[in-house]
């Protein structure tokens, strides 16, 4: 099982292209995110969540998909509050950087990134 996880973490060929939503940019190979000219300082879990949201933008991403993507290596259930805290941190960092991208909560469904 550990070997399979290690293979999944390897970079995919051709998948290293930058992601962009509005003024928000994410470099999967360098694990960096920028909003405009401001580099966002984020934890690895926050970056994993942001990457998933950006890959699926503007679609709604369910809470279970976020938990599976960001905590795939950890055993045990992920608390609802844990996901909320990470999403709150991402929202605050986007707002502090002055990004035009907003993280919306869609009640009962999940979350999505959107530009005004």
Image (cartoon, grey):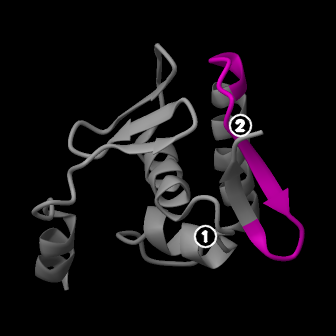
Dot 1 and dot 2 residues touching (CB under 8 Å): no
Q: Position of residue 82 (x, y in %)?
A: 67, 56
In the image, residue 93 above or below residue 71: above
In the visual, does 86 lie left or right of 95? left
In the visual, does 100 lie left or right of 65? right
Q: Position of residue 29 (x, y in %)?
A: 21, 44
Q: At 69% from the left edge and 18% from the top edge, which residue is drawn?
A: 96
Q: Position of residue 56 (x, y in %)?
A: 53, 64
Q: Which residues are magenta?
A: 95-110
In the image, residue 81 above or below residue 65: above
55, 70: nearer the viewer: 55
In the image, residue 88 above or below residue 99: below
Q: For the view shown, which residue lies furthest in the right direction?
A: 107
**Quarter of the image holding residue 81?**
bottom right
- Per the image, the residue denoted by label 1 is 78
Q: Which mark is residue 1?
A: none
Disc on the earlier residue, 1 or 2: 1
Element assignment for label 1: loop
Element assignment for label 2: helix
Q: Which mark is residue 91?
A: 2
Q: At 58% from the left edge and 59% from the top edge, which residue is drawn?
A: 57
User: Can the viewer see residue 54?
Assistant: yes
């Amino acid at each position: 099982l550990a070997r399979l996880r290690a293979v999944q973490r390897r970079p995919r060929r051709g998948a290293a292209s930058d992601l962009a939503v509005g003024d928000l940019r994410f470099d999967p190979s360098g694990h960096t995110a920028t909003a405009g000219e401001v580099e966002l300082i984020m934890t690895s879990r926050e970056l994993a969540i942001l990457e998933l949201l950006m890959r699926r933008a503007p679609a709604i991403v369910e809470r279970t998909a976020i938990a599976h993507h960001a905590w795939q290596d950890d055993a045990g259930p992920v608390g609802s509050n844990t996901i909320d805290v990470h999403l709150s941190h991402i929202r605050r960092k986007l707002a502090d950087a002055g990004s035009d991208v907003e993280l919306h909560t869609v009640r009962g469904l999940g979350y999505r990134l959107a530009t005004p």
